[in-house]
Amino acid sequence: MIYFEMYPGDYLKDTTRLGLTDHGVYFKLMLAYYSEEQALPESLAELYVIAGAITASDKAAVKKVAERYFPVAEDGLRHSKRCDEQISKAQGRIAEGQGRRDARKSNETERQARTRARRTMLFEELRAVGVVPEGLITMAELKALHVTHVTHNESVTNAAMSRVTDRDMSRQSHVKVGVKTGVNTGNQTPDPKSITPDTSLHTQGSLGGVTDAGRACLLMRQAGCHSTNPSHPELLAALEEGVTPEALGHTAAEGLARSPPVSNPFSWAIKTARNRHAAGATPANPDTTGGPNANPQFGSAEHVAEQRRLHEQRAAAGGFGGSGGDVIEGEFQCVQH
């Protein structure tokens, strides 16, 4: 115990027959009792040491006080009823206080973990549409960006944040919070069973707007391509060459619609879309088969003639798949005029 309660009235009432030396002995023995939180030894020789008794009068005072206020109990130790009660109360308060401290610590740890999980969720869903917030952005500002660029509805964002569970926190506990822009973590492999947001922090253009790379990744994910990366150099090169995000989304859908689907739709769609763009062809919109939304170039007579010319040119140079060959992955459709 680091302190004990002292009631002067009770003390003076119980010690009216003690002399000055006796009071000193009583205090020394009582302080030893409280500091060790256990009863005193039976041996008078040990009590002499505890009280610092040297002279015969001092030792006589120790014996008098010990026998009157610290009698030997059944366990062979000298007990004080009042000291035992005070120690028991103090230990209860200590245990109760420790329990409250542990509960507060546990609650605070859980709150911080939930906040980190929610921030991670908001960061990743914003990056999926090409918006890269600053690492030190406040939670309120992060939530406002999520409403503006992702859900367009505050209640939807609030519902998404409230769905962050303990399972989500354990899954995301390895994600380092406080990320800095310019760091590429796009090599993480997401679970193909769930649409996990992109983890790239690559920034293109304004941090507050949706980039072409972000829009392309969003369209490809909507087509079923779960693993995308807006900072992928091949994707950036394709967009630089003039390949549109819509073309990449349609190409990814085309690859996944094959039987069997392509194994890596993200890379396949980028490569195929670049080759088609270089050849002047674009993929047909998988959602439309004709009418005003049908692609006017893919499969046209001019396109077929151009592909035949390229085929003859490659055949003269050594055939498809040879050194320097540029195989175009595409499916041709006959168009009636």
Image (tube, rainbow, N blue to C red):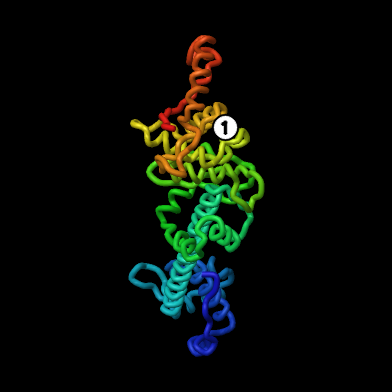
Q: Which residue in the structure is indicated by mark 1?
A: 234
The residue sitting at 56% across, 50% down in the picture is 177
Check the image and report above or below for 242 versus 32.
above
Q: Image quadrant of residue 68? A: bottom left
Q: Position of residue 313 (x, y in %)?
A: 53, 14
Q: Position of residue 256 (x, y in %)?
A: 39, 36
Q: How many marks?
A: 1
Residue nearest the viewer, comparing 216 with 34 = 216
Check the image and report above or below for 313 versus 270.
above
The residue sitting at 49% across, 88% down in the picture is 10
**Residue 136 shows in this picture:** yes
Q: Position of residue 332 (x, y in %)?
A: 43, 28
The residue sitting at 49% across, 55% down in the picture is 117
Check the image and report above or below for 256 versus 209.
above
Q: Position of residue 19 (x, y in %)?
A: 56, 84
Residue nearest the viewer, comparing 287 with 153 = 287
Task: Count neighbours of disc 1 (C-alpha within 10 A) and say few if under 14, some if 14 to 19, many if 20 or more.
Answer: some
The quarter of the image holding the C terminus is top left
Q: Image quadrant of residue 55? A: bottom right
Residue nearest the viewer, comparing 260 with 42 = 260
Check the image and report above or below for 44 versus 126.
below
Q: Amino acid at mark 1?
A: Glu
Residue nearest the viewer, comparing 136 with 53 = 136
Q: Residue furthest right?
A: 205
**Residue 191 shows in this picture:** no
Q: Residue furthest front?
A: 337
- Report the side of 191 relative to 138 (left or right): left
The residue sitting at 40% across, 46% down in the picture is 194
Query: Under tag 1, what secondary structure?
Result: helix
